[in-house]
Amino acid sequence: MKSIHLALDKEIQEILKEQGIVELYPPQAEALPYALRGENLVLSIPTAAGKSLVAYLAIVQRLKNEGGKAFYIVPLRALAREKYEDLKCFEKLGLKVGLSTGDLDESDVRLSKYDIIVCTSEKADSLLRHGLHWLDKIKVLVIDEIHLIHDPTRGPTLEVIIAQFKTLNPHTQLIALSATIKNAVELADWLGGKLIQSDWRPVVLKEGVFFKNSIKYNDGSTKKITGDSKQTLELLVEESLKDGGQTLIFVNNRKSTVSLAVRMSLVVAELLSDKEKKDLKNLASSLKREQNEIVSIEQTLLSCVEKGVAFHHAGLESSQRRAVEQGFKERQIKCIVATPTLAAGVNIPARRVIIRDLWRYDENFGMKPIPILEYKQQAGRAGRPRYDTEGDAITIAKDSNQRDQIFYNYILADTEPIYSKLGSQPALRMHLLSVIATQFVHDAEGMYKFIQSTFYAYQTDEFTIKKEVDTALEFLLENQLIEKMDDGYLSTLFGTRTSSLYIDPLSAIQLKKALERSCDKETTPLSFLHAICSTPDLRSLYLRGTDTWVEEKAEQIQQSLLLDIPSSSNEDYEWFLSDLKTAFLLEDWIEELPYDALVSKYNIWPGDVHNVVDIAEWLLHATREFARMYNFSCVSNINDLLIRVQNGCKEELLNLVSLKGIGRVRARALYHEGFKTVNDLRNVPLERIAKIKTIGKAIATNIKQQIGESDVRGNKELRGFKR
């Protein structure tokens, strides 16, 4: 450990002391001098070794000395919130910290007043597409989790952002933070930065394999666990908990998170104090969905939480995931059973990590081993700084051969190298359209020069690059997203709007086709819901063998669909049914089918419903914008459909849901009581509205304020309201 002095401003050092930071970890001490000198930097060090602090200090020191702005880019919204909260402590220096993860079809002008902007990579890319007039003011660009360049969905966006900054503002300092990866040298070379690579951790990590009631660790030590070996997981969780530790268990599917959490809750509940049980009951209450629309699977979560255990995966509501994470951080929840997404998300360390599954189902390959990098991310969650001197990560073997294989293939193995995913046609066509639409490049020469600045070009031969770029350009030309001019390329109005709407060009083509066909067809809400579900931007629901009803319904509604229906012998027919199933989910949602019924009928989770709804909202917004160009008569209907999808309500509730705080459940309650429009609520006593189920005094008061009756009448009613 080294004390903090270096060239740091005294005010910054005081803020660090207030946060309990008085010494630097060895990797931080090595990296910080380069960061403070404004050099480009790649930090490839383990979880919890303090990467983020180096980036924070580089930002605040430079902005305090020179002014300007900084971007802090993360892959996930949850991480953005975490980094935003961390950076808020530096506002004492007079720096304003902003958070932006939302609407991708706006320039977010409010951000210009902030000095440090934390955002997701998609939001940063969107801001670049809308033309940041303050781009030259960005002195530091931090890219958190840069190893996700390897990810097919997020990677290309991250790479293009970096390439654009390198070209547009070469004086911007680039700081890339990463887990330990094999080819970090390549990344540092591409960025023109200093590489700081280390295996040091603040809490010693022991990795081991459990077999026959004994854990064999990578440091040569062994540990006996007494008990029935048929209950391996129970024994490992119980031993950790009795020693004051918490446990994370990683499994390969959502179903297992639930069944295993229920199992573990029986063990943990026996070891809780009365105070802990009381605190957990309060935490479980906070997890309940508002407006009484709780579904049965969520009831299972509440029951587990009351016993000190939770499950965690992408099918839960984001608010529920956050509450589980916070409950674990505050040491109320003793054990979380999670899918691997938790390991790549917010920082949640535990005394013990158990990695039950080293294999996972892949729809293209069947069961396949998980990557070493993923194993290391999961194992890296073991050990809580300030609480533990060491953490242990344990896998489970069926026999001695498997134990040896786990040691060789995972514990002692190097992580895989990472590779650019920008070379795929979907990624290239989207990002090439963007750089043409924003006039970042004007001609073929500029195009190739831009691509040459990417990590893709660093890893790929010139012939392959030219071939793939030419294919993508041909696609954009053929579909009239760009046009060839004498001096280069120009985006068409269609192409420019596609780029600013931040959707896949193929999605835009599908929506345009649907709108043009809608001119000569009688449409229904399902017509447009199917159109958006047929785009590559919305991942359709999995079609199960029991979903024969989808094909049966398809025959009844095919006349109202706006896109071509493949023949049943065509290999795309199953994709069509999958898209249609997703459209039926949205149709049921706007027909006010309860959550529990949706979850049961479609065999999904509440979080999945919201994921589909969120993307559907975005695509309907895009459809409405294209309708202004290709079929203006549809704009009003699509706008109503968009509001219905946002609120999950029938058309008759559109007027009521325009009130803030009134969703589909409260609107339906008002409607049942005879209040069918906002106007019907005028001159109605506040007490009358408050008595309606799900409304209450606070919501009733809010309604009165929104309709302009809060001044005299509302106050009198409030004073006379009976408690």
Image (spheres, grey):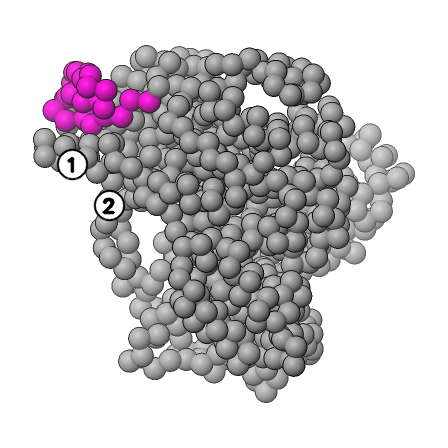
Q: Is residue 687 above or below residue 657?
A: above
Q: Secondary structure at mark 2?
A: strand
Q: Is residue 643 left or right of residue 247?
A: right
Does residue 78 appear in this view?
no
Discs 1, 2 touching: Cβ within 8 Å: no
Residue lying farthest right? 712
| Location of residue 661 in the rendering, given as x and y in whole percent from the top left corner | 68, 45
Q: Which mark is residue 356?
A: none
Residue appearing at x 74%, y 25% in the figure: 93
Question: Badge 1 local density, few (<14 within 10 Å), some, or many (20+)?
Answer: few
Residue appearing at x 50%, y 77% in the figure: 474
Q: Is residue 523 above or below residue 148?
A: below
| Location of residue 360 in the rendering, given as x and y in whole percent from the top left corner | 27, 47
| Location of residue 385 in the rendering, given as x and y in whole percent from the top left corner | 44, 18
Which circle, 1 or 2, is nearer the viewer?
A: 1
Q: Which mark is residue 369?
A: 2
Q: Is residue 597 above or below residue 246?
A: below
Q: Is residue 140 left or right of residue 709?
A: left
Label 1: which residue? 405
Does residue 127 appear in this view?
yes
- Report if residue 219 lies within the magenta region: yes
Question: Badge 2 local density, few (<14 within 10 Å), some, or many (20+)?
Answer: few
Residue appearing at x 65%, y 44% in the figure: 171
Q: So how many labels did they put on this image?
A: 2
Q: Is residue 471 left or right of residue 660?
A: left
The amino acid pointed to by label 2 is Pro
Q: Quadrant of residue 34?
A: top right
| Location of residue 12 in the rendering, given as x and y in whole percent from the top left corner | 67, 20
Residue appearing at x 39%, y 51% in the figure: 419
Mark pair 1, 2: CA separation: 12 Å
Residue numbers of the magenta segment: 205-228
Q: Which badge, 1 or 2, is on the more N-terminal residue?
A: 2
